[in-house]
Every structure is written in C-alpha cells, then in structure tokens.
Amino acid sequence: MSKSPETSAAGKETIEGARLAGKVAVVTGSSRGIGRAIARALALEGAALAIHYCRGEEQAASLAREIEERGGRARIIQGDLSRPEECHKVLTLAARDLGAVDILVNNAGVNRDRTLRKMTAAEWDEVIHTNLDSVFHCTKTALEPMIAKGWGRIINIASIIGQTGALGQANYAASKAAVIAFTKSVAQELARFGITVNAICPGFVETDMLSTMPPQARESVKGRIPLGRFGQADEVARLVRFLCTEGDWITGAQLNINGGQFM
C-alpha cells in the first residue's frame, strides 16, 4: 500500500512514496487561490504538475519552485483559456514536458458581475468562454491518452452559484451550471474507459475574489452559512485529492463543499 506524504525532520512535507507517484496532473488557473491549493495537494501526493496561469507568472513560478524544493516535478505554462487554441497549447506542452496527462482539474474561471440589463455581450462572452468553453476544449485535448491508458481523473470546479443562481451573476451562474451538466454527460461516456469525471461545487471560499466583497456583504453571506464561516482553499484541495487517490467508484457527482449553505 502506498504512503501519504511524510514530514521531514525540518518540518517540510516530502513527496517520496506518495499515492500519485508517476501521474501527471494539469490544474488550470493554478497560480493562485483554489487552483494553487489543488496543485500543491496533488504535488505532495507525487504527481508531476503543470501549473497553468494566464497573467500571474511570478505566482506560478513561486509554486513551481516550492514543489521542486520538495522533490517534485513542475512546469509552468501560460495560456488564455478563453481561446480554444490556447487550451490545446497548454495540454500539449504539459504532455510534451511531463508525460501523458492522467489528471485534469478544470479550475480556471473569471467573473464579470453585472445585472443583466447592464451586462455587455463582451462580459457574457468572456465568462462563458473562460469558465465553460475551456472545460470542453481542455477535456477533449486530454482525453485520448487517458483512454489509451484505461485510467484518468477529470475534475471540474463548478460553484454553488451554478446550483442556486445569484443576483448580478447570470453569466457566471450559467457557466457553472453548464459545467455541472457537462460533467454528468461526459462521466457517462467515459466510465467504460476507467475515467471518472466529477464536479466540485464550492461555496464561498477565502480567496482574492472573496476579499473584494464589501465587509457588510461578507458578514451577510457568512450569516447564511450554517457552519458559520467561509471555506478555505485547502479544504477544496483535499476533496480533489480524495477523488484522485481514493474516489475510484465516484463519477458523475456534483460534490457540495459549502458549509451547509446549499444542500
């Protein structure tokens, strides 16, 4: 039985002997926030990591250095995933430099919040292209090597907003609801190849995106969470790690991680 990451005498987690040794993972949007936490968690389990970023090159490079200092392998790859050719480029470079992709976490996303009456077509398109279309293009590009191996893990980061909707977020809600439906359909297609496909639907998590919320609005949101607090990126990352290491009989699921805000 393989071992989980251990802690060295210096207090640093080490990678040797971890459960995803020999696997290659791509985490889109992994220079910061939830994506960064997911990339770190998978690297600590031994996966070689393709760290994707659009604009945060310095943040991506610092995470790659952190992983390599712990004995892992990492490669940073830039790409604007609102463009299909860039999705293809990111997955192709990851496979070229690290090996065939075994794990794909579609995490990249943006929000352009505005009421529908004020929302521009460009704001609608940017969110749909980045949050939804990229999931299709990245998944399609990664698919054939997974089928050839008879093993793969595809995890799509959706949102509680895709389940409940939200005022001023018609574009974001539509993109995330579509990701959930996409997940269920593709899971049915790929199960016979040994590939699981799941959606994770986080609630409000302490990230840069949440930090822009006005204090009064933050307190109002927190008051509607039964567990009484916002989530942490590491908590979402641990759920991703579970699906990759122990969730062999879970596919087509939308997994809620929201402190009880939506059940």
Image: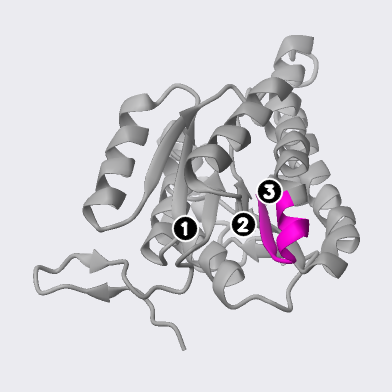
Hey, which quadrant is residue 55 in on the image?
A: top left
Q: Is residue 148 magenta?
A: yes
Q: Report the residue marked by disc 3.
A: 158
Q: Report the residue marked by disc 2.
A: 102
Contact between marks 2 and 3 (CB within 8 A): the answer is no
User: Is 33 on the left or on the right of 125, as rendered?
Assistant: left
Q: Amino acid at mark 1?
A: Gly
Q: Amino acid at mark 3?
A: Ala
Q: Where does residue 172 sit, x and y in percent of width and height? A: 71, 33
Q: Residue at x 48, y 46 (%)?
A: 98
Q: Residue at x 47, y 31 (%)?
A: 77
Give the residues in magenta. 145-158
Q: Residue at x 37, y 35 (%)?
A: 60
User: Is 118 on the left or on the right of 30, as rendered?
Assistant: right
Hey, which quadrant is residue 92 in on the image?
A: top right
**Can you tell which of label 2 and label 1 is closer to the viewer?**
2
Q: Confirm whether residue 252 shows in the render.
A: yes
Q: Where does residue 165 sit, x and y in percent of width and height? A: 76, 42
Q: Amino acid at mark 2?
A: Asp
Please tell me which residue lies in front, 133 or 161.
Answer: 133
Which secondary structure lies at badge 2? loop
N-term mark: 2 or 1:
2
Contact between marks 3 and 1 (CB within 8 A): the answer is no
Label 2, label 1: how far apart the Cα atoms are: 28 Å
Q: Where does residue 134 sit, x and y in percent of width and height? A: 71, 33
Q: Report the residue marked by disc 1.
A: 231
Which secondary structure lies at badge 1? loop
The C terminus lies in which quarter of the figure? bottom right
Near mark 1 (Cα within 10 A), the count class, few <14, some 14-19 or many ≥20, is some
Contact between marks 2 and 1 (CB within 8 A): the answer is no
Q: Residue at x 50, y 53 (%)?
A: 222
